[in-house]
Image (cartoon, rainbow, N blue to C red):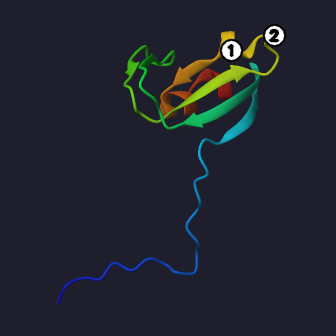
C-alpha cells in the first residue's frame, strides 16, 4: 500500500504578501534588510563575490545611519547575509 503524505491541517500556511522588511542590530550598526524575489537584473553578492542571477530571490541590506540609503544598498545571497559579519 502506498504512503500518504498528509499536511498538519491545524497549522495555517504563512501568507506571503510580497517583499518583507525588517531591522537587524549587530556590532557593526543597525541594518534594514529586505527580502526580494528578484528582477531582470543580476547583482554581485559582497559576501562571496559571486553573481546573483536575474530572477533569483535574495536580500538587500543597508545601514540605518547612512545618509543616502540607496548608495549603501547591497544585494546579498540569503545564506551569505545570514553568515555575514554584519550580524555577529
- Mark 1 lies on residue: 70
Q: Which residue is at a point 57% across and 81% down the rendered structure image?
A: 10
Asked if one can make out residue 60 in the rendered structure from this viewpoint, the answer is yes
What's the residue at 62%, 22% (across, down)? 85
Quarter of the image with the C terminus is: top right
On the picture, is 63 further left or further right than 84?
right
Farthest residue in the left direction?
A: 1
Where residue 52 is drawn, which disc sits there?
none
**Disc 2 target residue:** 67
Q: Secondary structure at mark 1?
A: helix
Crowd tier of the residue under label 1, counting other residues whose Cα lies within 10 Å: few below 14, some 14–19, many 20 or above: few
Residue 1 drawn above or below residue 60: below
Q: Secondary structure at mark 2?
A: loop
Residue 29 in the image, given as x and y percentages of width and height: 78, 21
What x and y, as percent, mark residue 14?
Answer: 59, 62
Q: Quadrant of residue 73?
A: top right
**Nearer the observer, 36 or 78:** 36
- Marks 2 and 1 sit apart, C-alpha to C-alpha, by 9 Å
Question: Which quarter of the rendering shows the N terminus?
Answer: bottom left
Amino acid at each position: 500500500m502506498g504512503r500518504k503524505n498528509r499536511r498538519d491541517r491545524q497549522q495555517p500556511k504563512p501568507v506571503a504578501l510580497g517583499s518583507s522588511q525588517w531591522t537587524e542590530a549587530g556590532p557593526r550598526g543597525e541594518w534594514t534588510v529586505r527580502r526580494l524575489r528578484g528582477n531582470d537584473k543580476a547583482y554581485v553578492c559582497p559576501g562571496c563575490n559571486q553573481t546573483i542571477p536575474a530572477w533569483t530571490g535574495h536580500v538587500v541590506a543597508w545601514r540605518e545611519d547612512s545618509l543616502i540609503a540607496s548608495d549603501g544598498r547591497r544585494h546579498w545571497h540569503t545564506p551569505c547575509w545570514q553568515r555575514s559579519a554584519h550580524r555577529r
